[in-house]
Amino acid sequence: EGRDGPRGVVRAEHRSGSTDAAAAAAMEPPPIVPTGGMTTFNMQHGFTEALVRGMRSGFLKDQDYHHLTQCENLEDVKMNLQETDYDQFLSDVTTVTPSIIQQKATEKMVIEFQYMRAHSVEPLSSFMDFIAIEYMIENVMLLLKGTLSGRDVNELMEQCHPLGMFKESTMRLCTAFDNSPKGYSDLYQTVLVETPVGKYFSEILAQKSAMLENAGEVRNVLEEVEIEILKNSLMKLYLEDFYYFCQEIGGETAPLMCELLKAKSDQRAINITLNSFGTPLNEPSMRDGDGWPTRKSLYPSIGFLYPEGTELLVNVSDEQTLGVAMEKIGGIYSSIWNTHVNEAISDKSIDDAFFEREVGRLRVRLRGRLRGRLMVSGVY
């Protein structure tokens, strides 16, 4: 055919189709790079990563600890710390005591944490909020327990952990409620709505009562349920919430943090079982069941023990049967239980064994080279 024949028409249509395809491709938005990807990591998290690395270099070294062991009094400790990154945290202290050293060291950590939080972006900012929520739960429970015992609000505020502080006026309102239906209704409005832990309180009360607006029901829950049971219920919901949040983040955060949270959940399940002996939670009717609170309902639904191991814990009735269950579970938990059995000899409690295990996991991750693991371990 000629140039203008059918063959020319096909070529023209082909050129037209290519042009249209190119134009359509140009109009499409660029692919979205997942948060935390290698192409955007420095833009989003480069500064906070540098902060973590700098803080890691400021940890006391073996040589520093050796010098501290040679000190004869706390003034010598203060003088030796002046050659480290802790040179200023006791500068305004005239009389040094162990409690002041702990207080100032905690304040230094909180200031650094809050500074890092102020320069973080999602999802790191929410991750750091989750870390602070654990201490907020501790503070809220301290305020509630102290108020029910008639303690002074200023004394309670001083004992609150600084990392778990939120709006001071709200925290003081937690201690100012009257022992009346209206007082408990006001407590519901402040503690359950105005604080970051409100959603966990609401879920607990939802399990107990379908009518959260009924102030009398809120009062019954807080009066009838022991504070420790309420605290364990809050921590269960918090750990599960944090766990699923880390799973949603994915990447390097998910396997690292999910492993740590599983270990923490196992610790809570074992401690809840151990501390339930001699209490109503150890009665057969209170060990298992779908009601709340039962001992089983306080176990987190995550962890290395869940579900087979926690089912063993549900049925134990004393330390002997708990020891048998721990032996069946085996592994590190058998070793941790042996620490508890030999506490009088080794002067090390089961909580010490759990703490050493957690610190060991974090230390290994903090020494790693992967950026995500360094960030998570340093912050957590």
Image: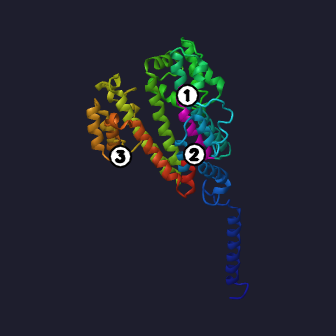
Does the rendering let one see residue 237?
yes
Up-down: is 113 above or below 207?
below
Residue type marked 3:
Ile
Residue type marked 1:
Asn
| View extreme (right): residue | 4
Q: CA distance from mark 1 to mark 2?
A: 20 Å
Mark 1 closeness class: few <14, some 14–19, many ≥20 residues within 10 Å: many
Q: Which residue is mark 3?
A: 332
**Picture coordinates of residue 345 (x, y %)?**
33, 36
Q: Quadrant of residue 281?
A: top left
**Picture coordinates of residue 209 (x, y %)?**
46, 22
Residue under the point 65% across and 47% down: 121
Residue type marked 2:
Val
Q: Nearer the viewer, residue 191 or 150?
A: 150
Image: magenta residue range: 122-140
Q: CA distance from mark 2 to mark 3?
A: 26 Å
Q: Which SS type dominates the magenta stretch?
A: helix
> Which is more N-terminal, label 3 or label 2?
3
Is 251 in the magenta?
no
Q: Nearer the viewer, residue 326 or 349?
A: 349
Task: Label 1, secondary structure: give it.
Answer: helix
Tell me, yes or no, whether the two marked residues, 1 and 2, touch with CB atoms within 8 Å. Answer: no
Q: Which residue is mark 1?
A: 139
Q: CA distance from mark 1 to mark 3?
A: 31 Å
> Which is more N-terminal, label 3 or label 1?
1
Does the rendering let one see residue 376?
no
Mark 3 closeness class: few <14, some 14–19, many ≥20 residues within 10 Å: some
Q: Quadrant of the N terminus?
A: bottom right
**Picture coordinates of residue 163 (x, y %)?**
59, 34
Numbered badge on residue 379: 2
